[in-house]
Amino acid sequence: MIMSKAELSRAPGTQGSLAKVLLTGTQGDRSHGLVWSLFSRSDEIKRDFLFREIEPGSYIIVSHRPPEDPHGLWNVTSQQFEPALQVGHRLGFVLRANPAMSVAQPGKKRGLRVDAIMHAKSKVSKMERAAFSAQDAQTAGLGWLIKRGPAIGVDFDAEYCSATGYRQVQVQRQRPAKPIEFSEIDYEGVLTVTDPIKLMAALANGIGKAKSYGCGLMLVRRT
């Protein structure tokens, strides 16, 4: 894997190329289009990178291919990303994820995909729903992540983990297509590695849904 930091260039002459890339996207889809500009895009090539916007115009990217800048839009620095993980390693992490989950539907093989926070809110009484707070949303969001620990080869230390910044995102598309809607939440905390192979797969392929729109990239560091 390759980890890159990509920042939009402010050099004279880049504005025209930047405008061309931006015009290929719609409102709410700018980052998606901008980051795609660093990777060859065709019907035969699927997205094989994850990204997170760390500030306007600045991104962290983990990819299977090195990024390329044919439009001259970016300042990019890259390095190999192959952390030596072992069972028992204690790591700090940050993650922006879409807390979606599948709920079984009577008589149907496929579950219904729902937002974990909205699902938790729907399970309480109407009176409790009116008082559903940001803290309740954070608790539900953190529960969503902790349940996924075994699948990604980690044990999250709930005492040192937080879930903040829950928000709804809407990506406008060309009519008559409906907007893409999803939620995202920011996680930070501490985990213990239980299965290095599973964790490496999660770091490379992402966690949860909405990966094309800046969700799913987990960054880890030794504590």
Image (cartoon, helix red, strand yellow):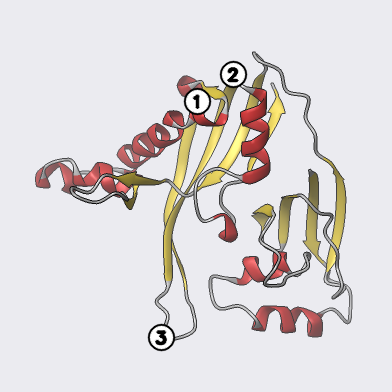
Residue position marked by numbered label 2 in the rendering = 194
The structure residue drawn at horizontal position 56% and vertical position 31%, both measured from the top left corner, is 152
| Quadrant housing the C terminus | top right
CA gap, disc 1 and disc 3 = 41 Å
Of callouts 2 and 1, which one flags the residue occurring earlier in the amino acid sequence? 1
- Residue 163: percent from left, percent from top: 46, 38
Pointers 2 and 1 in contact (CB under 8 A)?
A: yes
Question: Which residue carries the number 1 mark?
Answer: 150
Q: Mark 2: which amino acid?
A: Thr
Residue found at x 56% / y 52%? 215
Mark nearer the N terminus (1 vs 3):
1
Q: CA distance from mark 2 to mark 1?
A: 8 Å
SS type, badge 1: helix
As helix, strand or loop, the secondary structure at mark 2 comes to: loop
Question: Amino acid under label 3?
Answer: Pro
Say few, some or many: other residues with alpha carbon within 10 Å of mark 2 (under 14 / 14 to 19 / 20 or more): many
Q: Residue at x 53, y 70 (%)?
A: 28
Residue at 35% of width from left, 34% of height from top?
139
Pick whichever, 130 or 39, lies toward us.
39
Residue 132, position in %: x, y?
Answer: 24, 44
Tell me the crowding category of disc 1: few under 14, some 14 to 19, or many 20 or more residues within 10 angstroms, Cα based. some
Q: Amino acid at mark 1?
A: Pro
The secondary element bearing badge 3 is classed as: loop
Residue beneath label 3, please?
176
The vertical placement of 57 against 144, above or below, is below
Q: Which mark is residue 211?
A: none
